[in-house]
Amino acid sequence: MPALALTVGLVAGCGPAAGDAKAGSQAPPAASTPAPSAEPGLVAHDPPSWFDARGKVSLPEAATKGRTNLAGQVRGGGAGLPLLLHDARAFVASPTGIQVVDLATGRTAGEETAARGEPLRSDTEGYTLPPILAGSGNEVLTPFLMATPASGTYAAGAVVELVAVGTAAPYRAVWRTTVKLPEWALRSTKITVAAVGAQDGMAVVSVVGDDAAVSYGIDTASHALRWTHPGLKAVAVGAGTATGLLDGEPLTPVPVGVDLATGSEKWRGEKTYAPIMEGAGPATVRIAGQRPDGSKTDRLVDVSTGQPRADMPPGLGSMSCTYDQAQTLVCAHAFGVAAVDPASGQLLWALKDGEGDRKPPKVTAVWHGRVYGRGVGGPVALDARTGADMPTRPEAAPLLVNAYVGLALDEDNRLSSYPAGG
């Protein structure tokens, strides 16, 4: 499975306010035949039509610590929350470890897996990024930034510790490996590490500091470091390629694609001022920004070759876009929502403030042909291909979704899980 086809669905830039999940609301009757149950009390619906607040399960504080603002919103929406939904489990990361939550009961499944040593920085709450799924779905990979103390003639340093936790009981670490970081990691005032993706037995981890970056290819079978690419901020993994932005002139990085197995450069795009690169499908990325001659670019690009697949429709340059893991790219900002076919670049539909009787919702998540968000009358769900309102009110505006649950902020501004309904 391509690494871009993630388990969860989300749109960055929007987040539901506390209280969007209505406690005590009556769940609508099921409109479709549910899939077989994976856990007692949780039934798969792909995609969910609504979310049942009566089965609410609270997630650990680490799921949102350092990420909510005074308005009761999650900064950046669900994109950066430090957790992965996998079937009826949530794998929740913190700067020092990862815990597994049974979403049917709310209980922690097994013991928390801790990183070894001390965190590189003590102020990293709010910067931990989501784990990823690897190993044909039987491992969850989480990277940690750790400090190495001075010893003898060796100076203090920093490493990435990549920890793989099994997706079946007892949910323990099945392997670990460490990679030494460059000296700039110790000097960076803000530093993040991301597990970008995993495919064909190779995981890509990217570390970004104040003005530097580095990406690594790690073999998930041997656990050995296979390649290092200084200056590369990897963004997406798919079609045997890691795609990202390579350091160049200030604020003008170069889009590149590197071979997933070897790290060797496969293609290089043109320098782009203040670029945006986003995954747009199993083998496609979106690259937007300004060319050196001052003209703007906003294209869908083949990750294997770097060749354009299609231009994005005009007027979407300020919108962040998310692939729904099915066949649609959904783009949103505070005043509009649009959907694009990632194969052709065709604009499927758009809703903008001030145009027509319909008002665009504040999008919170997209997954498998559904767009979830907050409309003028409360939580809504739209058909991702047509933009039409779905007939069943979802009862919550989730930040993350899979077939079993939706995650939303409750009245206490805490992230909670709500069982999916069909």
Image (cartoon, rainbow, N blue to C red):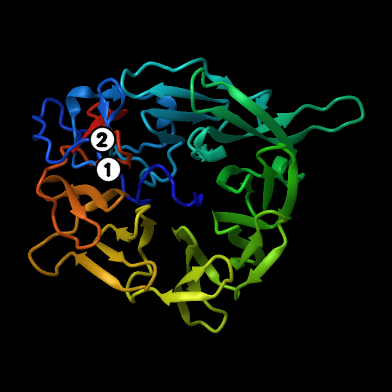
Q: Find residue 144 and report its image quarter.
A: top right
| 124 left or right, relative to 151 | left
Residue 391 image point, x, y percent: 9, 49
Q: 315 above or below 151?
A: below
| 245 left or right, relative to 316 | right
Please rate how many residues cluster around mark 1, counting C-alpha atoms within 10 Å: few if below 14, some from 14 to 19, many from 20: many
Of 129 and 205, which appears nearest the observer?
205
Q: Find residue 174 and report its image quarter.
A: top right
Residue 65 image point, x, y percent: 43, 30
Which residue sits at x=40%, y=28%?
A: 89
Which residue sits at x=67%, y=29%?
A: 176
Give the residue at the far right of this rendering. 153
Q: Which residue is mark 1?
A: 46
Of 300 and 238, which appears nearest the observer?
238
As helix, strand or loop, the secondary structure at mark 2 comes to loop
Q: Which residue is mark 2?
A: 35
Which residue sits at x=34%, y=69%?
A: 316
| 181 left or right, relative to 78 | right
Residues at marks 1 and 2 touching, judged by CB atoms closer than 8 Å: yes
Please rate how many residues cluster around mark 2, counting C-alpha atoms within 10 Å: few if below 14, some from 14 to 19, many from 20: few
Which residue sits at x=20%, y=66%?
A: 352
Q: Earlier in the sequence, mark 1 or mark 2?
A: 2
Answer yes or no: is residue 134 visible. no
Amino acid on which the number 1 mark rests in the picture: Asp
